[in-house]
Image (cartoon, rainbow, N blue to C red):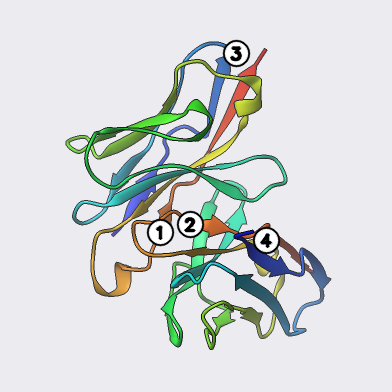
Amino acid sequence: AQSVAQPEDQVNVAEGNPLTVKCTYSVSGNPYLFWYVQYPNRGLQFLLKYITGDNLVKGSYGFEAEFNKSQTSFHLKKPSALVSDSALYFCAVSPLGRGSTLGRLYFGRGTQLTVWP
Amino acid sequence: EAQVTQNPRYLITVTGKKLTVTCSQNMNHEYMSWYRQDPGLGLRQIYYSMNVEVTDKGDVPEGYKVSRKEKRNFPLILESPSPNQTSLYFCASRAGQFYEQYFGPGTRLTVT
């Protein structure tokens, strides 16, 4: 079965400190990996994706993510957090497959990031 | 402007009264999906479609129907809503498997 785990429901970090939001996955084959952000009372916005190539991908608002194939992880990072980064973050996985999984995008349960001043 | 639109944004209804939530995208995307978001459960896929007349069940399809008669539209139908379908619903579209997904603004549904 395909699954995405975000082991931390909440991450709290002080402004200016680095942040990491963790994501691990269990899917067949080599998947495509995504991070989305949801600000309060808003829809979801795309942050970044890994398709192939360099394991470190850069995205919007200074975020980056590191793909680790051996650990099946795709952790979201930012060198210096801002209060405005406070939001709900979702990891998502699109299996590289055929048939019934081709259109699927599996989401983790989300991690609430709070950056305090 | 590239966007996914949903209507209505808010809906309060009673058990058993059929309703439809519309979804439309203007990006000519092949793939469209419906999700529900519930506290602590994240986003769960209800149905998805990879093209016109091609739909398939997601993780929580019970109590829902969809249709994809045109590429741009993907309505979600609740034939007989129940209180456990009270949730925040998102429609989304993307161009293909390795493209990012665009989300609509959400529809908050309350079934009493």
B61 in relation to A68, above or below:
below
At 50% across and 35% down in the image, what residue appears?
A60
The residue singled out by tag 2 in the image is B101
Q: Are marks 3 and 1 on the same chain?
A: yes
Q: Which mark is residue B87?
A: 4
Q: CA distance from mark 3 to mark 1?
A: 32 Å
Residue A86 quadrant: top right
Q: Which residue is mark 1?
A: A105
Residues under numbered marks 2 and 4 in contact, where contact means CB atoms less than 8 Å apart: no
Q: Residue at x 58, y 57 (%)?
A: B103
Q: Position of residue B21 (x, y in %)?
A: 69, 75
Whole-number angstrom distance, CA of label 2 to CA of label 3: 29 Å
Q: Earlier in the sequence, mark 2 or mark 4?
A: 4
Q: Amino acid at mark 3?
A: Glu
Quadrant position of the C terminus of chain A in the picture: top right
Which residue is at 65% across, 21% downward?
A83
Name the kind of residue labelled 4 in the image.
Ser
Q: Are marks 1 and 2 in contact (CB under 8 Å)?
A: yes
Dots 4, 3 in contact, CB < 8 A = no
Q: Badge 3, how many Cα within 10 Å: few under 14, some, many 20+?
A: some
Question: Which sits in the foreground, A92 or A50?
Answer: A50
Same chain shared by disc 1 and disc 4: no
- Of the numbered discs 3 and 1, the one sitting upstream in the chain is 3
- Confirm or deny contact between disc 2 and disc 3 (CB under 8 A): no
Q: Position of residue A56 (x, y in %)?
A: 30, 30
Callout 1: few (<14), some (14-19), or many (20+) C-alpha neighbours within 10 Å? many
Tag 3 residue: A15
Callout in the foreground (1, 2): 2
Q: Is residue A58 left or right of residue A67?
A: right
